[in-house]
Amino acid sequence: MHVRTATADEVPAVMNVLDGAVLSIAVETVRAGIEDGETLVAVSGDDPAAGRILGALVLDGTHIEAVAVRRRRRAQGIGTALVEAALDRRDRVTAEFDADVRSFYEALGFEIEPLDEPDRFRGERESER
Protein backbone atom coordinates (compact mmCIF):
# COMPACT_ATOMS: atom_id res chain seq x y z
CA MET A 1 0.00 0.00 0.00
CA HIS A 2 1.22 3.50 -0.91
CA VAL A 3 -0.14 6.97 -0.16
CA ARG A 4 0.13 9.60 -2.87
CA THR A 5 -1.62 12.70 -4.20
CA ALA A 6 -4.78 11.95 -6.18
CA THR A 7 -5.02 12.77 -9.88
CA ALA A 8 -7.87 14.47 -11.73
CA ASP A 9 -9.01 11.25 -13.42
CA GLU A 10 -9.48 9.64 -9.99
CA VAL A 11 -12.39 11.86 -8.90
CA PRO A 12 -14.97 9.06 -9.49
CA ALA A 13 -12.92 6.49 -7.55
CA VAL A 14 -12.34 8.91 -4.66
CA MET A 15 -16.06 9.76 -4.54
CA ASN A 16 -16.85 6.03 -4.54
CA VAL A 17 -14.73 5.53 -1.41
CA LEU A 18 -16.19 8.59 0.33
CA ASP A 19 -19.77 7.69 -0.61
CA GLY A 20 -19.18 4.12 0.59
CA ALA A 21 -18.34 5.53 4.01
CA VAL A 22 -21.56 7.57 3.91
CA LEU A 23 -19.68 10.86 4.10
CA SER A 24 -21.43 13.99 2.92
CA ILE A 25 -18.92 15.86 0.75
CA ALA A 26 -19.57 17.63 -2.53
CA VAL A 27 -17.83 16.43 -5.66
CA GLU A 28 -16.76 20.04 -6.23
CA THR A 29 -14.88 19.98 -2.91
CA VAL A 30 -13.12 16.76 -3.89
CA ARG A 31 -12.32 18.07 -7.37
CA ALA A 32 -10.90 21.32 -5.91
CA GLY A 33 -8.82 19.33 -3.42
CA ILE A 34 -7.38 17.24 -6.23
CA GLU A 35 -6.61 20.33 -8.32
CA ASP A 36 -4.84 21.91 -5.33
CA GLY A 37 -2.89 18.72 -4.58
CA GLU A 38 -4.68 18.36 -1.23
CA THR A 39 -6.45 15.04 -1.79
CA LEU A 40 -4.49 11.95 -0.86
CA VAL A 41 -5.21 8.36 -1.83
CA ALA A 42 -3.99 5.06 -0.47
CA VAL A 43 -3.48 2.59 -3.31
CA SER A 44 -2.88 -1.14 -3.33
CA GLY A 45 0.07 -2.96 -4.82
CA ASP A 46 3.69 -2.16 -5.52
CA ASP A 47 3.03 0.35 -8.31
CA PRO A 48 1.46 3.50 -6.78
CA ALA A 49 0.31 4.70 -10.20
CA ALA A 50 -1.57 1.51 -11.07
CA GLY A 51 -3.06 0.30 -7.79
CA ARG A 52 -6.69 0.28 -6.71
CA ILE A 53 -7.76 3.15 -4.44
CA LEU A 54 -8.31 1.75 -0.95
CA GLY A 55 -8.84 5.04 0.90
CA ALA A 56 -8.91 8.79 0.46
CA LEU A 57 -8.33 11.92 2.53
CA VAL A 58 -9.44 15.40 1.45
CA LEU A 59 -7.63 18.37 2.98
CA ASP A 60 -8.67 22.00 2.89
CA GLY A 61 -5.54 23.77 4.06
CA THR A 62 -4.91 22.14 7.44
CA HIS A 63 -8.45 20.83 7.91
CA ILE A 64 -9.36 17.23 7.09
CA GLU A 65 -12.65 17.55 5.22
CA ALA A 66 -13.05 13.79 4.89
CA VAL A 67 -11.13 10.57 5.37
CA ALA A 68 -12.50 7.17 4.37
CA VAL A 69 -11.37 3.62 3.67
CA ARG A 70 -13.16 0.92 1.70
CA ARG A 71 -15.31 -1.13 4.08
CA ARG A 72 -13.44 -4.42 3.53
CA ARG A 73 -10.07 -2.74 4.05
CA ARG A 74 -10.81 -1.00 7.35
CA ALA A 75 -8.76 -1.71 10.48
CA GLN A 76 -5.63 -2.34 8.38
CA GLY A 77 -3.84 0.95 9.04
CA ILE A 78 -4.94 2.65 5.82
CA GLY A 79 -6.75 5.55 7.50
CA THR A 80 -3.81 6.01 9.84
CA ALA A 81 -1.41 6.10 6.87
CA LEU A 82 -3.55 8.76 5.18
CA VAL A 83 -3.64 10.99 8.27
CA GLU A 84 0.11 10.53 8.83
CA ALA A 85 0.75 11.49 5.19
CA ALA A 86 -1.34 14.64 5.70
CA LEU A 87 0.76 15.45 8.79
CA ASP A 88 3.92 15.00 6.70
CA ARG A 89 2.62 17.84 4.50
CA ARG A 90 1.31 20.19 7.23
CA ASP A 91 2.52 21.48 10.61
CA ARG A 92 -0.84 20.51 12.10
CA VAL A 93 -4.21 19.18 11.02
CA THR A 94 -7.73 19.54 12.38
CA ALA A 95 -10.90 17.52 11.87
CA GLU A 96 -14.55 17.59 12.90
CA PHE A 97 -16.20 14.22 13.36
CA ASP A 98 -18.98 12.16 14.93
CA ALA A 99 -18.68 10.17 18.14
CA ASP A 100 -18.49 6.87 16.26
CA VAL A 101 -15.01 7.70 14.90
CA ARG A 102 -13.67 9.46 17.99
CA SER A 103 -11.57 6.43 18.93
CA PHE A 104 -9.83 6.58 15.52
CA TYR A 105 -8.70 10.16 16.15
CA GLU A 106 -7.81 9.45 19.80
CA ALA A 107 -5.59 6.56 18.71
CA LEU A 108 -3.79 8.94 16.36
CA GLY A 109 -3.03 11.34 19.22
CA PHE A 110 -5.49 14.11 18.39
CA GLU A 111 -6.44 16.52 21.16
CA ILE A 112 -10.24 16.34 21.15
CA GLU A 113 -12.93 18.70 22.38
CA PRO A 114 -16.72 18.54 22.08
CA LEU A 115 -18.60 20.83 19.71
CA ASP A 116 -21.94 22.47 20.45
CA GLU A 117 -23.73 19.83 18.37
CA PRO A 118 -24.57 16.58 20.19
CA ASP A 119 -22.08 13.74 19.51
CA ARG A 120 -19.81 16.01 17.39
CA PHE A 121 -16.17 16.68 18.13
CA ARG A 122 -13.20 18.68 16.91
CA GLY A 123 -9.68 17.33 16.99
CA GLU A 124 -6.26 18.78 16.37
CA ARG A 125 -2.83 17.25 16.08
CA GLU A 126 0.57 18.80 15.57
CA SER A 127 3.05 17.29 13.16
CA GLU A 128 6.09 15.57 14.62
CA ARG A 129 8.35 16.65 11.77
Image: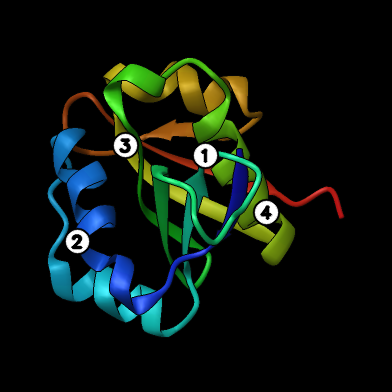
> Would residue 91 be visible to someone looking at this image?
no
Tell which circle, 1 or 3, labels the residue nearer the N-terminal end: 1
Q: Position of residue 4 (x, y in %)?
A: 58, 60
Q: Which mark is residue 87?
A: 4
Tell which circle, 2 or 1, labels the residue nearer the N-terminal end: 2
- Mark 3: secondary structure: strand
- Mark 4: secondary structure: helix
Instruction: Report how far apart the C-alphas of labels 2 and 1 lie in the structure.
Output: 17 Å
Q: Which mark is residue 97?
A: 3
Q: Nearer the viewer, mark 3 or mark 4?
A: 4
Residue assigned mark 2? 12
- Mark 1: secondary structure: loop
Q: Position of residue 13 (x, y in %)?
A: 25, 54
Tell which circle, 3 or 4, labels the residue nearer the N-terminal end: 4
Instruction: Report how far apart the C-alphas of labels 4 and 2 lie in the structure.
Output: 25 Å
Q: Residues within 10 Å of mark 4 (few under 14, many from 20)?
A: some
Q: Residue at x 53, y 18 (%)?
A: 76
The disc labelled 4 sits on which kind of residue? Leu
Name the quadrant containing residue 93: bottom right
* Depth check, front residue: 49 or 98: 49
Q: Residues within 10 Å of mark 2 (few under 14, many from 20)?
A: few
Q: Which mark is residue 44?
A: 1
Instruction: Report how far apart the C-alphas of labels 4 and 1 lie in the structure.
Output: 21 Å
